[in-house]
Structures are given as C-alpha cells and as structure tokens.
C-alpha cells in the first residue's frame, strides 16, 4: 500500500503547505518574504513550512537573490521529479497513460487500443499498461503518489465504484478496489468528463470565479461543472449528464436505455452510425471512399472530412449534431449562467466549422439576455487531456507534501 494518504482539505496546516508549495512552483526561485506576502501568511509560518519541505527534499535553496536593503534573501525552488502522478484515460477505443511530475511536466505518455470492454480483461489491461509505464519510464515506486483513473459513466464518489457505464455496458463494478488489489499505489477512479475538465482548467486558467462547464464531445457526450471551490458533484453525484438530455421524442436508442438523447444523435459514435445507415440505404456520399467501402472502418472523422469537402450527407449529419449540442449548451446556459464553456474531446479536433455551427445553435436556442457573459472556447490539451486530468485528480486528492 502507498505511504501517501488522502488529503484533508479542511486542515488549515495542509492548505497552507499546499499554497506555499504552489507559490514556489509558480515563482521558480522565490524568497520567503515574497511567499509570505503572496499566500497571506506570516514570515515565521512560511519559515516553518519551507524548512519542513526542504528537510523532505521537496524544495531546495537555489542561492541568494537581490538585496532590497538588508541581507540578500535565500531563493527557493521545487525539486523536479521528486513526485510522480499517473493518469489513465480509459476510453472505448483507446487507453492512454501519462506520467506527470511535481513540476506539472508530462514526462511520459503512451496509448494503446482498448482490447476488450469485459471488466476483467479491461482491468488487466489497465494494470499492465500502468506497470509497464512505470518500469519503462524508470520511476522509483516510492515517488509515485498515485494513479488517477478517468472512467466514463456514473462513478460512486467515495468508493470509485462504476455504478453504470453505458458505453462499456458496465453495472456495479468495483473498479477502484480491483485496481488497488493489483497495483501497489493509491488508486482513485473519477468520472472521465470531470477528469478531462479539471485537466483543461489547470492548463488554461487558474480558477473559475463563478462557474465553468466543460463539455466532452467524443465517443460519448458528457460534461463537468466546476465552481470556485472545485468540482460540483450534485446531491447524488450524477451532475453533468448533458449528453442524456432528451431532445427528440421517439428518437434513436441511446446506450443509457432512453431514446432521443443528445448523445444518441451527436456523439462520435452516433455520427458514424448515421453515416452507416445512410450508406446502407444507398444514399450517395464520398464517405464510402474514405472508409474504402468497409463499414467497420467508418469513423466520425471521415464524416467530418467529407462535410468539409461539401458532401451533402456528411454536412447534414454534422449540422444536426451541432444543432443538438447547441441546444444542450443553451439549456445549461439558461440554468447555470456560466462564465465559460470549454468544449473538449475528439470531435472538437475536426476544425472551426463545427465549433462555429455549435455557437450559432447556442445563440438560436438560449434565452434572450441569459448568459450574457459566457465565453465558449475550445480546450487545448489534445488527445491526452483526460489522462492528464486523471493525474490532476491525484494531485488534488492525495497529501504528497506531508506523508513521507
Ligand atoms: Zn442517453
């Protein structure tokens, strides 16, 4: 079992230590008086914390800074590669693993096709990929703080149990416990959309002042809501299921068991499925050439590429998807009036034309004057965003500054 324990965010001491550490990390060569000013602590309090962090080998003195009249102050910096955080993105088509160090640099990443969605086999693949990533990147085990696993579906917050994952066909699987039994580290399982959005927010800007919604447009569609004090889970922990808002009565079957959800029309999987059905119905389209006549190879990206080239069928599928996504976002804006909506996930990598269509649909459906300050932006972390978010789940929940 790992020596690192869960973070107690109610502890003032813990929070002070985190603030001082983050200040040194951001400052990169900073003296104690400046730290005290920035974090709002007395100089003796900062002295005590920094002495402790130096003793633990987490920060070090890098020499003397410029004098502001008296003695030249000692400058502090964070020891790179003192700790490592591992993030795992369990996707329907691929599994991605990243290693992030305590300076927030990604020092290793790997991606492999998802071999099976059967729980036992998938758990074995996650275990194998994580362990080989640790050995290939030569990480000392005692510096690995933990593993944050981003899993699509409803996750029980305290136990990391997968209550329901429509895209994997999972019900009630103790994913966190099973991984803990196999891996000699802390393991935390979090909903993939929440991990993704945390990763994007850490990458893009420091903190929301009111509310930020991140929307994952990928194989499925989900979202996460972030408030100034962190993720908003809701009373039952199921917040953010924007993909399962029903927009079409008697619409297509959705993996959640309902019909006509946004996800059943606008997800990557749904976009590919609609193209397959249209081709089977002999509708003329250049998508056939892109998948070389093989339906199994047909992916959403081919539909987007064809739409960009002016293919009528592809255009109509993409336009409908954008319209329904826009409708979902308008509902979210009317309800929550967020300051920012971050669009992330594979579908956003298909070009500005899709994002522009979504924005147009939002303005069509949102209530007049509602959400006047909302900015709709696209995430920047690319294909590894969710895995990076998994690593951040470990940073945010495990007390690596105290326990060693
Ligand atoms: Zn649904």
Image (cartoon, rainbow, N blue to C red):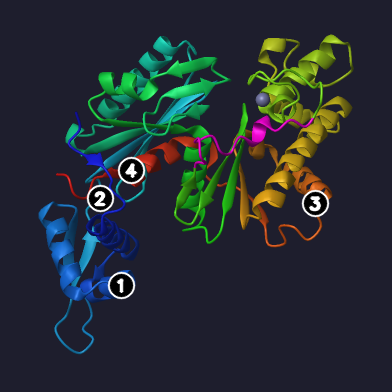
Mark 4 touches mark 3? (CB < 8 Å): no
Q: In the picture, residue 310 is in which quadrant?
A: top right
Question: Quick one: label 2 or label 3, which is nearer the N terminus?
Answer: 2
Q: Position of residue 292 (x, y in %)?
A: 73, 13
Check residue 244 for magenta coloring.
yes
Residue 397's label in the rendered image is: 4
Residue drawn 44% across and 35% down? 387
Residue at image position (68%, 21%) is 299
> Mark 1 — residue?
40
State the SS at label 3: helix
Whether label 4 lies within 8 Å of ligand 1 gets the answer no
On the rendered structure, is 195 left or right of 333? left
Sequence-wise, the earlier of marks 2 and 1 is: 1
Q: Is residue 245 above or below residue 48?
A: above
Q: CA distance from mark 2 to mark 3?
A: 46 Å
Residue visible at 15% across and 69% down?
47
The answer to which of marks 1 and 3 sits earlier in the sequence is 1
Q: For numbered disc 2, what is the local secondary structure? A: loop
Q: In this rendering, does residue 176 appear at all?
A: yes
Residue nearest the observer in this picture, 222 or 307: 222
Tell me where residue 168 appears, x and y as whole percent.
54, 17
In front: mark 4 or mark 2? 4
In the image, 372 versus 385, the foreground residue is 372
Query: Looking at the image, is mark 1 or mark 4 earlier in the sequence?
Result: 1
Residues under labels 2 and 1: Cα distance?
A: 25 Å
Question: What residue would you read off at disc 3?
Answer: 363
């Amino acid at each position: 079992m790992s020596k690192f324990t869960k973070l107690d965010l109610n502890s003032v001491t813990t929070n002070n230590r985190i603030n001082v550490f983050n200040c040194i990390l951001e400052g990169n060569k900073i003296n104690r008086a400046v730290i005290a000013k920035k974090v709002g602590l007395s100089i003796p309090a900062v002295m005590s914390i920094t002495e402790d962090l130096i003793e633990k080998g987490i920060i070090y003195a890098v020499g003397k800074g410029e004098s502001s009249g008296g003695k030249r102050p000692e400058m502090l910096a964070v020891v790179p590669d003192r700790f490592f955080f591992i993030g795992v993105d369990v996707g329907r088509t691929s599994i991605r693993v990243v290693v992030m160090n305590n300076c927030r640099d990604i020092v290793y990443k790997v991606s492999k096709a998802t071999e099976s969605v059967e729980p036992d086999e998938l758990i074995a693949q996650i275990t194998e990929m994580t362990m080989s990533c640790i050995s290939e990147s030569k990480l000392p085990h005692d510096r690995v703080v933990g593993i944050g696993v981003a899993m699509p579906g409803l996750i029980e917050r305290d136990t990391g149990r997968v209550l329901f994952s429509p895209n994997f066909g999972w019900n009630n699987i103790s994913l966190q416990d099973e991984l803990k039994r196999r891996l000699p580290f802390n393991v935390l399982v979090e909903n993939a959309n929440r991990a993704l959005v945390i990763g994007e927010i850490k990458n893009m800007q420091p903190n929301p002042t009111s509310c930020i919604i991140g929307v994952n447009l990928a194989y499925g569609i989900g979202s996460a809501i972030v408030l100034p004090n962190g993720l908003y889970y809701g009373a039952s922990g199921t917040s953010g299921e924007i993909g399962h808002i029903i927009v079409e009565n008697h619409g297509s079957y959705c993996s959640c068991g309902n019909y006509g959800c946004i996800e059943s029309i606008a997800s990557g999987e749904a976009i590919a499925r609609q193209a397959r059905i249209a081709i089977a119905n002999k509708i003329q389209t250049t998508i056939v050439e892109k998948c070389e006549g093989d339906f199994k190879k047909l992916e959403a990206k081919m539909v987007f590429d064809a739409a960009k080239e002016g293919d009528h069928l592809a255009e109509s599928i993409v336009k409908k998807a954008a319209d329904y996504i826009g409708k979902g976002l308008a509902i979210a804006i009317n309800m929550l009036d967020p300051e920012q909506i971050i669009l992330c996930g594979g579908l956003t990598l298909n070009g500005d034309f899709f994002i522009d269509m979504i924005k147009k649909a939002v303005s069509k459906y949102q209530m007049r004057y509602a959400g006047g300050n909302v900015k709709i932006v696209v995430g920047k972390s690319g294909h590894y965003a969710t895995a990076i978010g998994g690593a951040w789940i470990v940073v945010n929940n495990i007390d690596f500054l105290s326990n060693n």
